[in-house]
Structures are given as structure tokens and as C-alpha cells.
Amino acid sequence: MRRSFLLIMFVILSLALAACGDDDTPSNGNTSSESQFGLFDWDRDPDTIIVRLDAQPNQENPAFQLNSIPPCTLWGDGRVVWTTRNETGAEEVLEARIDEVTMRTFLEDIINRGFYGWEDELIPPSSVDPMVETITVSLYDEVRTIRRYGVWPQSGFTNILEQCQNLSEAPVRVLPDAGWVSVYEVPRDTLVPSWIWPMNAPFSLRELAENGEARWIEGPLATEIWLNAREGRDNTQVVERDGSAYQIAIVVPTISRDAALPPSETETPDAES
């Protein structure tokens, strides 16, 4: 009798412990948000940058700086934009969308590499125009950016960038037909690559350069400016019919670095910003 009583008590105790264990499990059965990296999530806003890998020279001309696209950017809704080179050496900008499992795996890999223990490189190298590489991650209610001149722990920038550029196997090529155009007058040089500004363009380059503003443009001309900028040359000139020469830049919302919204949603930005 005593043995039966002890057995019943053991069963009751086991059931109670099991019930307590069930209470610790999330009701939806999803435990992926808490792992060895601790509880983390990200802002799903499509306008929020979650990861950006960028590389910029310090001393390039304004048109080149505006035309350059960060090597890889991941937004909160899983949209990823990155750059690559085609067989001719021209830059191509690609875009895709990834699922949350792929995105979480990528973020965990960045954390696991030791990102939150890395520090800025404060002393630039002795080269004339060093390339500043940055990794920005927005997690844990914090936007953290690490800036270095090419020497990263565990070759972190190169490895994370390669992974970021291979998150999707089904990218599409970005060929925008609208954007903000800025113009900068330069001395005419017949030895550098050039192309002629069309006579039917909605404005003259001189007008835009003198006003110092960025102008919104739509249609095939915007795409032509974009493709010419992707050739990767920082000395290409656009020539007016009077022989004056300019360097031209186009920035595209949701693609380019710090691009303003279209004019229906914002005021015209200044070309120097």
C-alpha cells in the first residue's frame, strides 16, 4: 500500500514538473527569436537599414561620390541591394528579397564573427586617398557602425560582404527610370570619355550647375545617366552643344546612399547635400 502511494505521488510530481516546463515554452512554438546570441529582433520597416556594408574614398569628386552605390544594403523587410561587376567590368546593381530565416541566419553570423567586439581603426594608412570601409548593423535598439581602412578582424568586411551579396539566388537588375540629377562644371578635356547632352533634355546642364540644385528627372534619359555612371570612370564628361563640359550624377530613392524621396513626397534637395 505504501509503495502504491509513493508511486502515485511520483507520477503527480512528474506531471507537475512537465507542466512547469511547458509554461516556459512560447505559446506559438517559435523559439528562433532566442538563441545562443540572446533575444534579438529587427525593425521590419522597409525604410530601415538593418545591415549596410559601405566603402568610400575620401577624396573623390562630388559626382563620383553621389553615383557610387554601397556594396550591400539589407532593409528591414528583407530587401537587399548590392553591386557586382559584369564581364565587361561595368558595375551592375542587383536587388532581391529574402525570407526571415535567411535574414536571421545572416545576422547571427555577423554577431558570431565578433562584430560587437570590433572597434574603429583610428589611424589611417599612409596612402594618399585611403578607402574607408564601414559595417553598420541595427539591432538591440542600437545602430552600430564600425569604420576601418581595410584591416578587419578575421577579414570580417570581405567575408560579410561576400555573404551579403549571395543571400539570394534570384536577383533582378536595377535599371531605374527616375532619380535626382546633379551637375558640376569641369574644364573640357578631349582625352577623357564623354557623351553629348541631348538637345531635347528637359533642362540644360549649365542651368542646373549654376543653380546648384538637384533636379528630378524621369524616363529613358534617367536610365542613360544611370548606365553611364555604372561604367566606373570618375572622369567621364557630359558635353553641351556649346562645348562646355560637366560631370553628372544621379541618385535614386531606396537604392542610392541617402537619396531623397521623389518630389511628390519631399522638397527639392540641394545638390551639395
Image: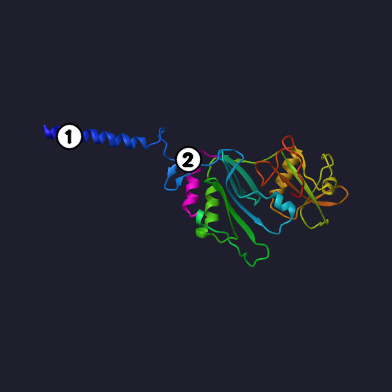
Q: Main secondary structure of the magenta part?
A: helix
User: Most extreme residue toward the left, as rendered?
Assistant: 1
- Residue at image point 60% right, 63% down: 122
The numbered mark, 1 or 2, whose residue comes first in the sequence reads 1
The x, y position of residue 142, in whole percent, is: 55, 48
Residue 237 among those drawn in magenta: no
Q: Which mark identifies residue 56?
A: none
Q: Are marks 1 and 2 in contact (CB under 8 Å)?
A: no
Badge 2 amino acid: Val
- Residue at image point 65% right, 62% down: 130
Residue 14 left/right relative to 53? left
Please identify the quarter of the rendering in which residue 125 is found: bottom right
Q: Nearer the viewer, residue 248 or 48?
A: 48
Q: Secondary structure at mark 1?
A: helix
Q: Which mark identifies residue 101?
A: 2
Q: Which mark identifies residue 7?
A: 1
| Mark 1 surroundings within 10 Å by alpha-carbon count, few (fewer than 14), some (14 through 19), many (20 or more) | few
Q: Nearer the viewer, residue 72 or 212?
A: 212
The x, y position of residue 46, in whole percent, is: 60, 38
Residue 113 among those drawn in magenta: yes
Above or below residue 42? Residue 244 is below
Badge 1 amino acid: Leu
The x, y position of residue 27, in whole percent, is: 40, 33
Image quadrant in which the N terminus is located: top left
Q: Which region shows up in magenta?
A: 97-115
Q: CA distance from mark 1 to mark 2?
A: 45 Å
Colouring used for the render: rainbow
| Mark 2 surroundings within 10 Å by alpha-carbon count, few (fewer than 14), some (14 through 19), many (20 or more) | few
The x, y position of residue 146, in whole percent, is: 57, 55
Question: Can I make out residue 165 in this image?
Answer: no
